[in-house]
Image (cartoon, rainbow, N blue to C red):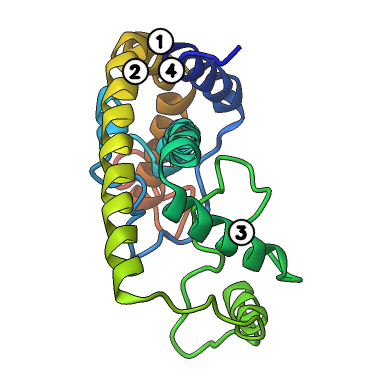
């Protein structure tokens, strides 16, 4: 029996809550480009995860919820949009022909993130994961071209799929509103203390950037 959207969202939130205690602040450089999946996401707004919440925490939830929407749209497409389904099947077969597929099988916390770190000026990479994937992709024949009529019909079906995705997205957001309290409680328990500790450590390092035990100053030294 197919699970309802309400059940799927509840289970996605449960899975995210089980993962959240393992989250730790990133120690590497932040990225310049924002995450297109998370920035301005109505899903995160419905969940109560604002801009003050670290991106890693946001991404783990938004990706899990996106999977729900993607699955619903895939079922709708298979039932009602034959041209789009054929195009997707051909693309899936092309993807399976790749010998190197670094974006497949990732945990939700990493799905959709850039495969390589931002480059450092003056220190080029010898190779990148994205570059290797592009080399493999270039060796696979492209999909056959479509006629103008087929392109127009395909665009129409893509529009219908987008409309359905928006409808499911609104339903998902409505369900997430009922989970806001426990989502925010988990952030307060597991995320905010770690952020506070980082800020405290930063304050200490700014107060004493060179000497961890600075001179207490005149009048405070022992006789």
Task: Looking at the image, tell me whether mark 4 or mark 2 is earlier in sequence order.
Answer: 4
Mark 4 vs mark 3, foreground winner is 3
**According to the image, label 2 marks what residue?**
176
The x and y percentages for residue 45 are: 25, 29
Seen at 34% across and 38% down, the residue is 220
Neighbourhood count class around disc 3 (C-alpha, 10 Å): few under 14, some 14–19, many 20 upward: few
- Which mark is on residue 5? 4
- Which mark is on residue 92? 3
Vertical order, 66 against 119 (above or below) = above
Residue farthest to the bottom?
A: 122
Q: Regarding mark 3 in the picture, which secondary structure is present there?
A: helix
The x and y percentages for residue 150 are: 35, 67
Mark 1 vs mark 4, foreground winner is 4
Q: Regarding mark 2 in the picture, which secondary structure is present there?
A: helix
Seen at 33% across and 14% down, the residue is 175
Q: Nearer the viewer, residue 31 or 26?
A: 31
Q: Nearer the viewer, residue 53 or 110?
A: 110
Residue 222 shows in this picture: no
Q: Is residue 116 left or right of residue 204?
A: right
- Which mark is on residue 33? none
Neighbourhood count class around disc 4 (C-alpha, 10 Å): few under 14, some 14–19, many 20 upward: some
- Whole-angstrom CA distance, mark 4 to mark 2, is 10 Å
Task: Looking at the image, tell me whether mark 1 or mark 3 is earlier in sequence order.
Answer: 3
Q: Nearer the viewer, residue 173 or 209?
A: 173
Seen at 49% across and 55% down, the residue is 113
Q: Is residue 71 left or right of residue 33?
A: right
């Amino acid at each position: 029996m197919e699970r309802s959207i309400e059940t799927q969202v509840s289970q996605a939130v449960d899975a995210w809550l089980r993962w959240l205690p393992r989250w730790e602040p990133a120690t590497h450089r932040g990225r310049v480009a924002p995450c297109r999946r998370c920035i301005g996401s109505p899903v995160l707004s419905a969940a109560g995860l604002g801009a003050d919440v670290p991106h890693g925490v946001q991404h783990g939830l938004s990706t899990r919820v996106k999977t729900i929407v993607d699955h619903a749209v895939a079922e709708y497409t298979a039932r009602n949009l034959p041209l789009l389904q054929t195009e997707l099947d051909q693309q899936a077969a092309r993807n399976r022909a790749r010998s190197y597929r670094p974006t497949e099988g990732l945990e939700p916390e990493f799905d959709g993130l850039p495969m390589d770190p931002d480059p450092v000026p003056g220190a080029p990479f010898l190779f990148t994961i994205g570059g290797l994937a592009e080399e493999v992709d270039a060796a696979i024949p492209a999909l056959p071209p479509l006629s103008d009529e087929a392109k127009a019909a395909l665009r129409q079906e893509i529009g219908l799929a987008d409309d359905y995705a928006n409808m499911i997205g609104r339903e998902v957001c409505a369900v997430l509103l009922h989970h806001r309290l426990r989502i925010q409680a988990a952030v307060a328990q597991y995320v905010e203390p770690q952020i506070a500790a980082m800020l405290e450590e930063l304050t200490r390092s700014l107060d004493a950037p060179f000497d961890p035990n600075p001179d207490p100053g005149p009048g405070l030294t022992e006789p």
